[in-house]
Amino acid sequence: MNAAQLFIQCLENEGVEYIFGVPGEENLDIMDALLDSRIQFITTRHEQGAAFMADVYGRLTGRAGVCLSTLGPGATNLVTGVADANMDHAPVVAIAGQAGTNRLHKESHQVLDLELIFQPVCKYVSRVLSPDVIPEVVRKAFKIAQSEKTGASFIELPEDVAKAPAVARPLPVNQPYPPEPPQQQVERAARLISEARNPMILAGNGVVRAGAWKHLSDFAEQLNIPVANTFMAKGVTPFRNRTTLASAGLQANDYISCGFSRADVILCVGYDLVEYHPYLWHPTRDRTIIHIDRTPAEVDEHYNVTVGVLGDIKQSLIRIAELTTPHQGHLMRPLREALIAEMNQHRDDRAFPIKPQKIIWDLRTVLALDDIVVCDVGAHKMWMARMFRCEYPNTCIISNGFASMGIAVPGAIAAKMVAPDRAVVAVTGDAGFLMNSQEIETAMRLEIPIVILIWNDGGYGLIEWKQLNSFQRTSHVDFNNPDFVKYAESFGARGYRVTAGDQLQDILKQALQQPTVSIIDCPVDYSENLKLTEQLGNLVCPI
């Protein structure tokens, strides 16, 4: 047995199902060892696509997604997706081949210090210099990647080490249990919530990672406390619940910020600062903050925690609820009612190009409640975060830590692999789509049927929105697109073009029934962006 074969045994020992990646010269031994493994290698068309697939796989399953590249440019192509996973707290283990150890001390073809490159975007990095350490390195990489707060690990395997003889064996996999919350902190939190006039919950993606969404929903309903979620925690409480507000994060004076401005005690449950900066929702720095999470709070002048309840989020919520006096009513119900009215406003709109609100209405109408949407980054993300109703967590995947464009298409492929019995739609702008559209070939080759819904505005819509808000003029945001229908057909996929305001629902239904990739070109009216900005800017919080 050589070191590469031992390495693959260690990955099997960790329960790895898939490795997403691109074969190369410096990972030849790994690729050969995979031929005798139960792990399925998913050959992608770009390493960034592979990293995004591992990212979404990790986020949906809670198990580390694995991606692989060769050295140099292959490894640097992984960086964006690995950074996205790390900042979004999705468990990922990235692996790269490397030149032989006899070349690492000097200037050499394609050689970069990959440990140094990946250090800022990972929780753990390691270079394997001996076959004997492989079991420890792999076990540590997975343990750290999958421990709260979850994130990315990176392993570099030089080609001469991969060829060397190995006699070691994989290490046992032990899953640590989260600790019980301290009783003293539970009691302090319960007392503050009971005495509060207008408590409010800000739920983050940590609730999803902990599997505590039902516990949070019961907690909020039992105590009658309204819940706002970050973009990455959509569906953490069902929208049908009377306590659910919506996603926080559009801008300072939207409905949710009006809610924060009324709250005297804010319960941050599984909240990560990268999801929604505290200075946006707590500019006054004078509210009582209760931090409920597995790990201590990050230091921030706008996030000064009064009580930290650290431990299993499920148990923390159960035990706090047992000691807390329920509230009779909350003052933020008008905000929820206003948002529902806004969602319903354009349901019958027939204008063309189609308004963002209408696209979302049609998409929500067609999809089942447990189907999955993977949203790219751009103006459409802001609309989806605000108006796409979710009843379950992880049914609208949004990157909002690193927030990298290009995640939707490869992410949707991974989502469909995780949940083959559910419909999966990649919601993307025309810019984000073309950043990783090469992975359509991957989906076609593997017969993975996804729907790609392109919001087509011929430009960088979100940047245009920001430019007009700041300078009342635009700068270099326009571009041209290919014929997306012909582009789809060139891959052997189905292509559709929306040409009227009442067509999208029928096209979506047809696309979702196809046993192949379907791409929908949907022109969007982003003049609604500035109308929303004006509406939010003029919003006055109800007394």
Image (tube, rainbow, N blue to C red):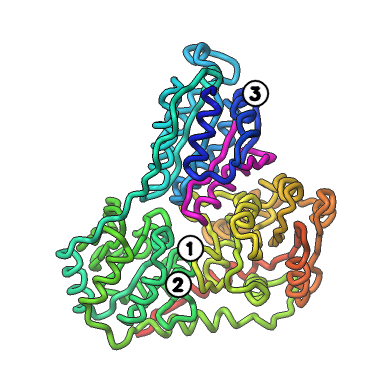
Q: Which residue is mark 1?
A: 231
Q: Which quarter of the image is occupied by the N terminus?
A: top right
The residue that appears at 47% across and 42% down in the rendered structure is 14
Q: Is residue 62 magenta?
A: yes
| Camera sees residue 68 | yes
- Where disc 1 sits, the SS reads helix
Residue density around tag 2, few if under 14, some if 14–19, many if 20 or more, within 10 Å = many
Point out the tag, 1 or 3, that comes first from the N-terminus. 3
Location of the C terminus (image quadrant): bottom left
- Which amino acid, mark 1? Phe
Which mark is on residue 373? none
Q: Position of residue 147 (x, y in %)?
A: 37, 48
245 relative to 181, above or below:
below
Residue hosting label 2: 254
How far apart marks 2 and 1 lie (CA) works out to: 14 Å
In the image, 114 versus 368, the foreground residue is: 368
Looking at the image, which residue is at 52% across and 13% down? Answer: 103
Hey, what amino acid is under mark 2?
Asp
Magenta segment boundaries in residue numbering: 40-69
> Of the residues under marks 3 and 2, which one precedes in the sequence?
3
In the image, residue 45 above or below residue 505: above
Q: Nearer the viewer, mark 2 or mark 1?
A: 1
Question: In terms of secondary structure, where does tag 2 sit?
Answer: loop
> In the rendered structure, which disc, 2 or 1, sits on the residue that comes first in sequence?
1
- At label 1, counting other C-alpha atoms closer than 10 Å, the crowd grade (few under 14, some 14-19, many 20 or more) is many
Residue 68's image quarter?
top right
Comparing labels 1 and 3, the label whose residue is closer to the camera: 3
**What residue sits right under mark 3 in the picture?**
25
For discs 3 and 2, the disc positioned in front in the rendered view: 3
On the picture, is 308 further left or further right than 227? left
